[in-house]
Amino acid sequence: MDTAHHLAPQPAGTATALPAHYYVDPGMAAVDRHAIFDRGWQLVAHVSQLREAGDHVVADLAGLPVIAVRGADAAIRVMHNVCRHRAGPIAQCDGLGAKSLRCRYHGWTYTLEGQLRSAPEMKDARDFDVAAVRLPQLAVKVWQGLVFAAVDPARAPDFDAFVAGIDARLGPDRGLEGYGGHHRAGYDIACNWKVYVDNYMEGYHVPFVHPGLNRLLDYRSYRTELARWHALQWSPLESDPALYGSGDALYYWLWPNTMLNILPGRLQTNTVIPLGVDRCRVLFDSYYADAADAGRRDADIAFSDEVQHEDLGICEDVQRGFASGSYVPGRLNPLRETGVHHFHELLRAAYRDANPTLP
C-alpha cells in the first residue's frame, strides 16, 4: 500500500477521494485523535448556556471528556472532566449555578476555577497537598458567542486565521452571540466521522437524498466558498413564513468537525464526535432569535430531524460500502465536491504533519 501516494496533495481538477482504509482501519481512531482533534479547535458550547457563575456544559472532544464552566470571576474555562483521584466524572450533565464542582464518584470537590478544595477522608494520606491538585485546562476562545477549546494550542491553527472572513460575511445584523432558546438533538450513526463530514461538505447529493430540503434551496445557485480552515456552502432560500421565510442559507464547516447552519431566525451548531472507527455521534444544538415563536421552533426541529434521518441512512450505507472491500478511490466532481476536496487536502496535510504510523 503506497501511503505516501495517498497523502500527496492532489489538484482539484484531477482529485480522487481518500481510500477506504482511512474510514475502516481500527488504528485510524487513535491516529485521528492525535493528528487532528488534539491539534484543532473544537466547539464546546454557546454563551447562552453559560450566562451565570457556576453554569456548566459537558462535552466530548474526540474521547477527552471536558467541562466548560463560567467561573466566579466571570471567565469561561474548559477543563478536563476527569477527577484527579481515580478518573471519575466531575459532572455528568449540563447544569446551572453550581457553587462548586464535585466528582460524582468519591466526592472530591473543586472550585469553579478547577482547584481542588476538599477530598473526603484523605487526612491520613501522607504528603497529600490539596492545594497542589488542579483540573487541567484547555486553551479557550469565545467568538460570535461560541466557545471553542484546543487541547494543544501550540499545534492548533491561529484562531484569527481559523475564522478569517466569517465576521465580515455575517455582517452586523447576523451575529451569532444573541441567540438563545437552546434545544439539542443527538444521533448515533454507524459510520466513521469523516463519512459524515464528507456528506456535509457537498450539495451534490441534495436532489437525490433530501427531497424536502431540495425544494427550499436553489440547487442551480448552490455555491461553495473555500477558506484556509473553513468552507461555506450558500444558497438562496425560499420557504413558508412559518418555517424560515425567504433569505439565504449559510452552511459553514470549520476544521475539523464543527458546522454552523445559519438560517433566518435560527443558528444550529452541528458537531461530529468520533466514537470508534465505524461510529460517531452527531449533536445538533439549535438556538433562536428572540422573535422566533414556539410554532416556528417546533417546525424547524421537525424539519431538521427529517433531513438528519435521511443523512443518517446514506452515511451508514457509505460506511458499509467502504468496509465491503469493493471500493477504490473515485474521482471527485470539480464543480460540486470542492468542499470534499478541501476537507481531504486538510486531512492529508494533518496526517503528513503528524507523521503517524498509518495503516
Image: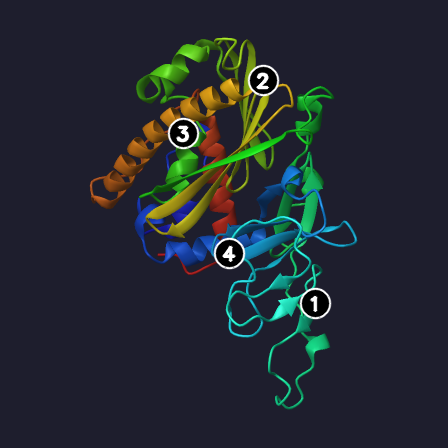
Taking depth in this image into account, of 83 and 118 the one nearest to the observer is 118
Taking depth in this image into account, of 348 and 271 the one nearest to the observer is 271
Tag 4 or tag 3, which sits nearer the N-term?
3
Tag 1 or tag 2, which sits nearer the N-term?
1
Label 3 sits on a secondary structure element that is: helix
On residue 77, which mark appears?
Answer: none
Q: Is residue 292 above or below residue 340?
A: above
Tag 1 or tag 3, which sits nearer the N-term?
3
How many angstroms separate mark 4 from mark 2 (CA)?
Answer: 33 Å
Residue type at tag 1: Gln
Q: Residues within 10 Å of mark 3 (few under 14, many from 20)?
A: few
How many angstroms separate mark 3 from mark 4 (CA)?
Answer: 47 Å
Q: Residues within 10 Å of mark 4 (few under 14, many from 20)?
A: some
Coloration of the structure image: rainbow
How many angstroms separate mark 2 from mark 1 (CA)?
Answer: 42 Å
Tag 2 or tag 4, which sits nearer the N-term?
4
Label 2 sits on a secondary structure element that is: loop
Q: Residue at the spot x=24%, y=41% of the render?
A: 320
How many angstroms separate mark 3 from mark 2 (CA)?
Answer: 37 Å
Identify the residue position indicated by label 3 in the image.
Answer: 14
In the rendered structure, are the residues bearing label 4 and label 1 in contact, judged by CB atoms less than 8 Å apart? no
Residue type at tag 4: Gln
| Rendered location of residue 117, percent (x, y) | 69, 71
How many angstroms separate mark 3 from mark 1 (CA)?
Answer: 54 Å
Q: Residues within 10 Å of mark 2 (few under 14, many from 20)?
A: some
Q: Is residue 9 visible?
A: no
Callout in the foreground (4, 1): 4
**Picture quarter containing residue 357?**
bottom left
In the rendered structure, are the residues bearing label 3 and label 2 in contact, judged by CB atoms less than 8 Å apart? no
Q: Residue at the spot x=67%, y=40% of the render?
A: 47
On residue 264, which mark appears?
Answer: 2
Q: How many numbered tags mark residues here?
A: 4
